[in-house]
Amino acid sequence: MKSNKLTPNSNLRWESSRMILPEWRKQWLQRQEAQTWQEPPELDDQMIEEYMQMIHDGMAYTWLFDVTYWQDGQFHTATGYVARFRDAPPQVWLQVGGAVLTIPVEHIQAVESQS
Amino acid sequence: MKRVVFLIDMMSFYASVEKVYHSHLSQHPVVVAGDPDRRSGVILAACPVAKSHGIKTAQALWEAQSLCPEVTVLKPRMQLYIDISTQINELFLTYTDQVEPFSVDESFIELTGTVHQSRPEQTAKSLQKAILRQFGIYARIGIGENKILAKSACDLQAKKRPGGIFHLSKNRLADDFWPFAIGELFGVGNRMEKHFMQTGIRTIGHLANYPVEELQHRWGINGELLWQYANGIDPSPVTPDTHQQKKSIGHGMTLPRDYHQRTEIFVILRELAEEVGRRTRDERLIGNQLSLGIGGTYENPVGFSRQLTLPMATNDGRVIYHACQKLFDRHWLGTPVRRIGVSLEKVEPDTHRQLSLFDEVEDRSSLNQTLDALKDRYGGGIIMYASSLTDAGQALERSKKIGGHYK
């Protein structure tokens, strides 16, 4: 059902009456983004090698993985099967539902097998 | 435990900022006004000294100057006000993460669940001092257990009291809220005020005690909403991410003179369409419903507002422009035009696109990306259609402004 100004927990009653300049909004969102910006992960070589070994093994047996990765200043976790591993540049192609997520190896924070 | 919500309002915000930058004017009447040579020559903000001479916001500049000939008139610096406004909101984030900016000079903050919840008045004083110390701006703070009580506490009480802070409790509505005239209730405009007066509702208290069913029957959702406000009922949350969601992207302008020729109006339509396209791309969105609003002149206020569904969602200014042309030609009666607004609605993330099986659609994304990069780096005036350099064009002038006022 379409929400209206009386819908519980909706903020529509205030959103419909406010005046915000687009330039103000853009700057506020940029500042908010900058405040929550996180640096990319810095994994040591041994940890990366361990994760890559796990991914290679998992590809053979179509294991389901939880991959935590960094993108645009934020960490995300996606669950899927590894569809492909590319060497140059090193990338993991994770099949998540009907889509393929391309994750650079240097942006991987953690890999966990669900299998 | 009851919620604790603040509505923090910066007094005469633009004028206060200017007084900080022109400290020698601290005791003088100061107003910030639009370009005096144009229709926008109205008062955007007046300092308390200017207000004591009878000057009001939105008054014509000539009127203000006749009330107070010694008033100092300053041009607005919108980018500066935006910078300071966002910095003030960052200060609020040191008190709570629940910050919802409501306008450039007003914000809601929720202190429920923070260490400040048990002593709201002391927190308000500390916040007021911090804003004054860090930015030189005096803030008024309304406190309530929800947003409407906080907003009403600020507008009806805190702004009129020496300390600039007021706590409107729900059990004191009859004394602190209901005696005010109905026109002072948030959300009641001139037309609604007239309707209420005709119904015998002259104060907020009269509305609060009026049968809600009758209000619903007569004014629908809005009738019930205003009844809720009058009774201090507002379940809406303070919503920090409220600015992240976008339902439509629009751009409009009041023209500096009446436009009579179709070709002249098309120059403006193209400029607005390009700006809407740029803003939509900036948000990484596309939209498939176009809305065009045309406003007439003061003497001949004939206009229209019409919508058109596009065959495919877009964020390309040229596609938007062609749709605007189509809508305009279909509905324009040849009367002079003074205001034009274009908006793209039903927007969604630009992650996928429908392909046309029948028409070849020109991919202008690289061209648009290049134009956007140029404008982001050098400003909106760096590149534009040649038509914008004709007498009808406004893009160059607009590129020097924010919200219709000088940057």
Image (cartoon, coloured by chain):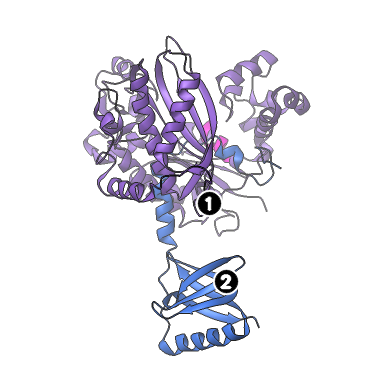
Q: Secondary structure at mark 1?
A: helix
Res. A17 image quadrant: top right
User: Compared with residue B261, is residue A68 higher up or lower down, i.e. above or below?
Assistant: below
Q: Residue at x 62, y 67 (%)?
A: A97
Chain letter for mark 1, please: B
Residue B78 point in image, percent of width and height:
32, 38
State the residue in front, B390 or B183.
Answer: B390
Q: Which residue is mark 2?
A: A95
Q: Colour of chain A?
A: blue
The answer to whether dots 2 and 1 both sit on one chain is no
Q: Chain of mark 2?
A: A
What is the x, y in percent for residue B209? 73, 27
Indicate the amino acid at tag 2. Gln
Is residue B162 at all visible to an observer of this figure? yes
Res B54 visible: no
| Colour of the chain lettered B | purple
What's the distance in space between the residues labelled 2 and 1, CA to CA?
30 Å
Residue drawn at x 69%, y 15% as measured from the top left: B199
Estimate the x, y position of residue B26 in percent, counting from the top left. Answer: 27, 35
Residue matched to label 1: B241
Judged from the image, the secondary structure of the residue bearing numbered disc 2 is strand
User: Where in the figure is residue B302, as x and y percent of width and height?
Assistant: 48, 14
Number of marks in picture:
2
Which span is picked out in magenta? B149-156
Above or below, B156 against A101 in this view is above
Left or right side of A46 for B117: right
